[in-house]
Amino acid sequence: MNTLLKIAWRSLWRNRRRTILTASAVVFAMVLALFMRSMQFGSYDQMIQAGVNQVGDLQVHDTGYWANQSIDRAFFYKQELGDSLKSLPEVKAILPKLETFSLASYGAQTKGVLISGIDPQEENSQTNLSAKIIKGNYLKEQGKGVLLGDKLAEFLKIGVGDSLVLIGQGYRGLTAYGIYPVAGIFHLPSLEMNSQLVYMNLPNTQEFVYPYQEGLLTGISIFLKNPSEINEAQKQIESRLGKDYEVISWKTILADMLQTIQLDNVSGQIMLFILYIIAAFGIFSTVLMMTMEKRKQYAVMVSIGMQRTKLIAVSVLETFIVAIIGVIIGLIIITPILIYLHLNPIPITGDMAEMYLEFNIEPVLPFALQPDIFIKQTLIILGLSLLSALYPVFYLSFFKVLNAFRH
Amino acid sequence: MSIIKAEGIYKTYNETHVPVNALNGVDLQIEQGEFTAIVGPSGSGKTTLLNIIGGLDLPSKGNIFIEQTNLKDLSSKQLIDFRLHHIGFVFQAYNLIPVLTAKENTEFIMVLQKRPKKEREEKVKELLEAVGIGDKANHRPGQLSGGQQQRVAVARALASQPKYIIADEPTANLDSKSTHELLDLMADMNKKYQTTFIFATHDQRVMDKARRIVTLDDGKITSDETFDR
């Protein structure tokens, strides 16, 4: 093997310029592919993280709520349910929620809003909502204050300390209504949330929807210690809670977003495929030239007694070495750039930023650093190189020695 | 005892759709230790016969025995292996592996034979000294003259300890001085190692050294003479 490796290595450096050019094609493909994939996956992670921060990794509802999201399918919280969830080792935190739709009115302005009843302390520890307050104060455990998105406040022409009128449908046909002072105004990286969402203390929301019994919830968001083990956690919780409750993953809750990601991913894959084809042709043309150029040498080697399989090994080694050199240089170039961009995402401004906000995404271009991106791209590029080596494999398997001598 | 026995060898090429009979019933026996030249005009079938004797080509009709082995009975892989262990080659254009040094080129064939490293090193040293380029062992072919490269080719051919060496026009690219030196060298090797040499040549200087001259014309042996040299 040493001799074969020596022949392959020296053959490559016999035509230094060509080897450098071929390795450059691999470097180019690696750098571009990793840059694109890291940016894409960074954006996806950001979208997913933003979504999961809002809804939790898992949600527990009354069975059937997800299929028919009516306030009448809310359930009454039992302490043992919360204790049971909290006692699971996979669970980091739980956030009980009561969500309902209502009309919000101030002065002559009225708008449909989503009221999200939350435990202020738990919510803040999970989503850091208090940091998003731009005017006034965050919710207190006691008191009737509500938080409004800045766009909603702008529409209603309401400010901190003003009274917001809410009227909507309560539990089991009741009319829900109330007047609530505005405690604070928040700004989230989502136009939709900023223009529709009202946060309210959970007990106040429960009283607003159904004043006759405490503890009404539409769901409990569960945050996991290790989100990558969501499937196991979901099964565990389902078996513990039994048939009265359904456990839904964020993948179901955010199905639309996942579909958008998948579509975008396909377009990215098409771009990558084109890039791979260009790189593969770069490598293939070199392999083709190398094979043609060495036909006579191959003929001599077979004549003196070298088996074709060993010749094939030399040829594949040559291609593999060029690819490895290209991959390593590519990784050396792109890795520090991606680390920098991961730590310092590129801010997006102007109309593009608005568009990002509309899709609930913070207007920055984050870069992902998951090892599987690097591993996958490296394997694909190496695979393509080996695919290019199929030509010499084919040629060396079947070429006629005497014909090769004549060339 | 004959080491090579060609019986009724015919070779027809059909490459241009017009059959060309390169060999028309050649019978030939070559004994151990011979120093034989196959001569004849261009197109007489010298190279074709040499290719068949060297196991690089098979006859369209007839049999070629190397000792007891009929080369026609061997598969492609077996034929390659047979060449590795039994036949040495010296080509007109030297055809050394350009990325290996003289030493590595000579050793290469023994690596393929999987001989022990120590044995290889000793043999390479001995052979390169014998062909007179022991001081250029670490030079690559590009750093050697034509004559020096052909000497390395002879060393490489001898390294596998073959039964015989096939040399197709080995002096065609050499000047007069290098030709004489190479022929003297091969004659010495023939005597020293009792290795059989078979040349295809037009070169009178080679013919003058050969102890047997087989003349081919139109694919047939027209004369077969031996000389006491």
Image (tube, coloured by chain):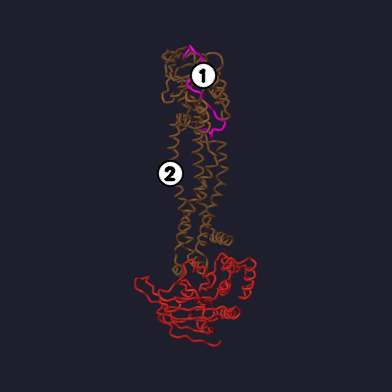
Chain colours: A brown, B red
Q: Chain of mark 2?
A: A
Q: Earlier in the sequence, mark 1 or mark 2?
A: 1
Q: Amino acid at mark 1?
A: Tyr
| Depth order, front residue of A343/A118 | A118
- Where is B227 relative to B115, above or below? below
| Depth order, front residue of A376/A398 | A398
Q: Chain of mark 1?
A: A
Specify whether disc 1 shares its chain with disc 2: yes
Question: Could you say where residue A140 lies in the image, as x and y percent from the top left?
Answer: 56, 17
**Residue A77: image tag:** 1
Q: Nearer the viewer, mark 1 or mark 2?
A: 1
Q: Amino acid at mark 2?
A: Ile
Quadrant in which residue A70 is drawn:
top left
Badge 2 local density, few (<14 within 10 Å), some, or many (20+)? few
- The residue located at (62%, 73%) in the rendering is B128
Q: Is residue A246 visible?
A: yes
Whether residues under marks 1 and 2 lie with C-beta atoms below 8 angstroms apart, the answer is no
Residue B94 magenta-highlighted: no
First to last magenta residue range: A210-230
Question: Could you say where residue B101 lies in the image, as x and y percent from the top left?
Answer: 59, 67
Q: Is residue A350 visible?
A: no
- Where is A104 relative to A353, above or below? above
Q: Which residue is mark 2?
A: A270
Question: Could you say where residue B2 lies in the image, as x and y percent from the top left?
Answer: 51, 80
